[in-house]
Amino acid sequence: MKTLSVSHLLGIKYLKPEDLHLIFETATHFKEVINRPIKKVPSLRDITIANLFFENSTRTKLSFELAEKRLSADVLNFSAAQSSVKKGETLVDTVNNILAMKVDMVVMRHPHPGAAHFLSQHVKSCIINAGDGTHEHPSQALLDAFSLQEKFGDLGGRRIAIVGDILHSRVALSNIYALKMLGAEVRLCAPKSLLPKHIESLGVSVSTDLMEVLNWCDAANMLRVQNERMELSYFPTTREYSQNFGLTGERLKKLRKEIVVLHPGPINRGVEITSEVADSDQAIILDQVENGVAIRMAIIYLLASKLNIPLK
Amino acid sequence: MYYIPTMTPKVLLSEKRVNIMLNRLCCQLIERHGDFSETVLVGLQPRGVLLLDQLIHLLHENGIFSIQKGKLDTTFFRDDFRRNEVPHNAKATEMEVSIEGKNVVLIDDVLFTGRSIRSALTAIDTYGRPKSIELLVLVDRRFSRHLPIQPDYLGAQIDALQGDKVKVVWSENAFNNIVYLEKQSQ
């Protein structure tokens, strides 16, 4: 019987390839479960999970909450806007107070990189990182890779492009780790101002020519420009960005082959991707959302199986 | 799939006896379910599916070809989650047919404590509300039940000590359908 090599999900960086395969295999079974007339299993009926969102989220929060409810866990939702964090309480105090209410697992999104890692060292609970600043977003990378694997089978040797705001994207970093671990080739495409220095050291290639990258790849993951993380201007205008790095139907038609298009959401239609592309058959954006619930059920289920809770 | 015993095995039921039992079970199913138009046979993963395959083969030999069937994995419905050192890994579930209003026959190789069947009863409910649910097992380990569950179709009853393992071994050769039943002391 297989089990995860980790007790928390802090980032893809800390996982092994076998962990990814186990998560995908389990998610395949959960995907079948969530397509039944009754989409619930009783596995986690004695587990309570707190969703701590110190940063805004729609998709990830809903997806985690639904995954937890499908597993029959009790769910506590917390958002920083209405909390005592505003009154000056520290992260460790906030979480320890929630854990004192007999919470078993914590799903956390936080604006500061490394927050999940820090928390895992200071509180006695299982931590799942739902995005920490510009660092990692492991569940998103897992669902992206799972969706690609559904489309292509084995990702070994497949060429995947990540296009857009790489500098501010936690999705990009987690995707790079996951795709490289699964044997795929990764090429990044963005304006030079939105590419982190020395990113090639992660084993990826870099380009600023979108058409060249699109012709090279089997699938393109289009990232959103994260204006909320930008303290200064990284490109002259949104229109210019869209002209150079936006994925349009016209560009797709010019390619030698049909590629798969991904987007982690939320979409800025007309900026990084046009409506024509986002709603086309080549886009697997809604498959990603469905797979997100199955992947998160798998992550929670596998981590919960390692929880050391006295049952007697 | 070949079973390599780690300790001296004891054959409880010979190949000939198991084949007679399989034929009897097949006849009992036909007697009660007729043309199988309102019946769904569901093999429980992993080993009940192998028994299901054997029964389907025999039903075909008896001229019944239109059989609705499925494979059900009960891992996520088990009551021992987090009670084992290492968790069970799920197997594939294939329930392409509707069970709503149908007569479902759950099929497993060995009935021991009854806990797997209890989880199967919960799991099958997630696909709809069947008219009835019956249980078919090849081997019933007597006096070892933890729950009030009994089979409707039974190959044979055997007595084994609590620590013993009873294993049904199916041959890979579908033409001979050789089946061994062995007892292993821990």
Image (spheres, coloured by chain):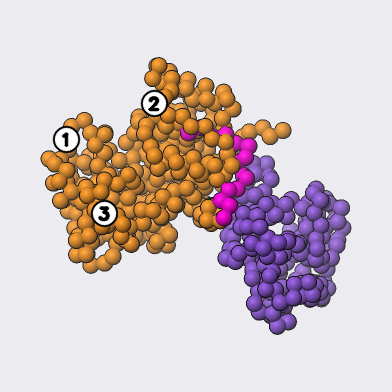
Q: Residues within 10 Å of mark 3 (few under 14, many from 20)?
A: some
User: x and y percent of residue B28 in the render?
Assistant: 80, 72
Looking at the image, residue A126 sits to the left or right of residue B154; the answer is left
Q: Chain of mark 2?
A: A
In the image, residue A245 above or below residue A303:
below
User: x and y percent of residue A27 in the render?
Assistant: 50, 52
Looking at the image, residue B77 sits to the left or right of residue A49; the answer is right
Amino acid at circle 1: Ser
Q: Is residue A41 magenta?
A: yes
Write the residue at 24% across / 37% down. Answer: A227
Looking at the image, residue B71 sits to the left or right of residue A217; the answer is right
- From mark 2 to mark 3, how far is it between C-alphas? 32 Å
Mark found first going from the N terminus, 2 or 3: 2
Judging by the rendered image, the residue that carries numbered circle 2 is: A81
Judging by the rendered image, the residue that carries numbered circle 3 is: A275
Q: Which residues are magenta?
A: A37-51
Judging by the rendered image, the residue that carries numbered circle 1 is: A233
User: x and y percent of residue A216 in the render?
Assistant: 24, 60
* Residue lying at the far top of the rendered structure: A87
The orange chain is A
